[in-house]
Image: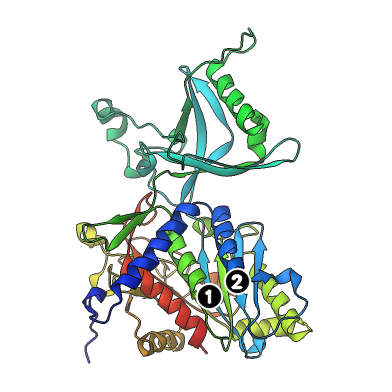
Amino acid sequence: MLLKKENGWKNKDLEREKIFDFCQEYKTSLDLGKTEREYVRFGLELAKKNGFVCANSKERLEAGDKVYYVNREKNLVLVVVGKEDIKKGINYVVSHIDSPRIDLKQNPLYEELELAYMKTHYYGGIKKYQWASIPLSLHGVVILANGERRDIIIGEKEDDPVFTIPDLLPHLAAKYQGDRQTSEVIKGEELQIIVGSIPTEVKNSEIKELIKYQILEELNRTYNMIEEDFISAEFQLVPAFKAKDVGLDRSLIGAYGQDDRVCGYTSLKAILDLNEIPVKTAVCFLADKEETGSHGSTGLQSNYLEYFTSDLINKIQGTYNDLDLRKTLWNSNALSSDVNAAMDPIFKGVHEPQNAAKLNYGIVVTKFTGARGKSGTNDADAEYVWSIRNLLNTHGITWQIGELGRVDEGGGGTVAMFLAEVGIKTIDVGPALLAMHSPFEVSSKLDIYETYRTYKVFFEKMI
């Protein structure tokens, strides 16, 4: 029989109202959680409302128990203990909740031409020119000199000021920017935000930078900050606009951070909505640092997955040894829940259409990612691909296959290979996006809902 896939909206049994309602809540999650810390807080609040308790509060765990782990405010793990012996494996759905953005440097503030600017360093893979001349909001946390912590968000309320990276006007850009490569139309060191232009009223001959001093006065007055406090701060610049419906039919969503919070939200909702005790223990893991290689103590290259899994084994069994951990991981299943690139009719040439994902064709199963000769990837084996294919078909999920562009065109990676390194059977499964890594990524509402359905069925039925 021929392989035939169709636009999911053609399905007469589709519950359109349910899909649109679900995606309205999803858009709210994007507006509330524009950084990994904010998304962990958002997810943790939902989890507590749904009966999850801190794992540290439980000495023993039994089937049906719901617990959470938080790692340094940047990882959230939700667990529903299953009926089966944990050594027979866990069903993990692992998403990342960090997104490409622009960070402030540790010593950012300066004045020139009687304007105050702040210097930045971009995070993750971006087209730098896309971040110029758009409204940006500032999100972050600062630890003051006295040890006090301040959480700061500027630019999200209607009456808040915003920030921007000024671009060069086209009248004067032809020679200065015209010969630059696309990646350098705006250079990294040119990603600087304007923060003020009014001089201080303080009369002191030793103050030479009057605009900079006025900005420091404002920060001190509002947040009790001094300039040195920037060194112990994490400040991120993200688009100031909210998630929006796209198109006259409202079938699409445009928003910042959908890579990969679309998977974070759908996996979060999937585990919260489990109505029965699953056979295998279910784990929703929201990770950090994927966009920069999954390094650091909150990335998948740390041993945090092994840390909380060890704790689960100990609390469920009452005993623990390293062999039990190895058996549990080796017998486990995982969905590396990350997005793929949807084919754009304007730029079809970068895709190989027979194996490219499309919007509205459902969740994308990606056997491998990587680049060139499949370097830097987990290449799922045929047996595991079949088990996922069978699961999706059995439960009527709208799905498609996909790969990340033509061979030798580019490529990219996910967390899948780090899960596979500890023996977990793993494959990438998530929706497709247009304009991935831009400040305004585009997704399909149908694909989002099918992603949620997939993760829920995986938690409930994957053996």
Tag 1 or tag 2, which sits nearer the N-term? 2
Inter-mark Cα distance, 2 to 1: 8 Å
Q: Residue at x 66, y 80 (%)?
A: 65
Which residue type does callout 2 highlight? Leu
Placement of 60 over or under 260, stated as above or below: below
Q: Position of residue 298 (x, y in %)?
A: 62, 60
Q: Are marks 2 and 1 in contact (CB under 8 Å)?
A: yes
Tell me how the rendering is colored.
rainbow
Q: State which quadrant residue 182 falls in.
A: top left
Q: Position of residue 126 (x, y in %)?
A: 41, 49
Q: Residues within 10 Å of mark 2 (few under 14, many from 20)?
A: many
Q: Residue at x 47, y 65 (%)?
A: 265
Q: Can residue 276 be seen in the rendering of this structure?
A: yes
Helix, strand or loop at mark 1? helix
Q: State which quadrant residue 52 falls in.
A: bottom right
What's the mark number on residue 78?
2
120 or 313: which is nearer to us?
Answer: 313
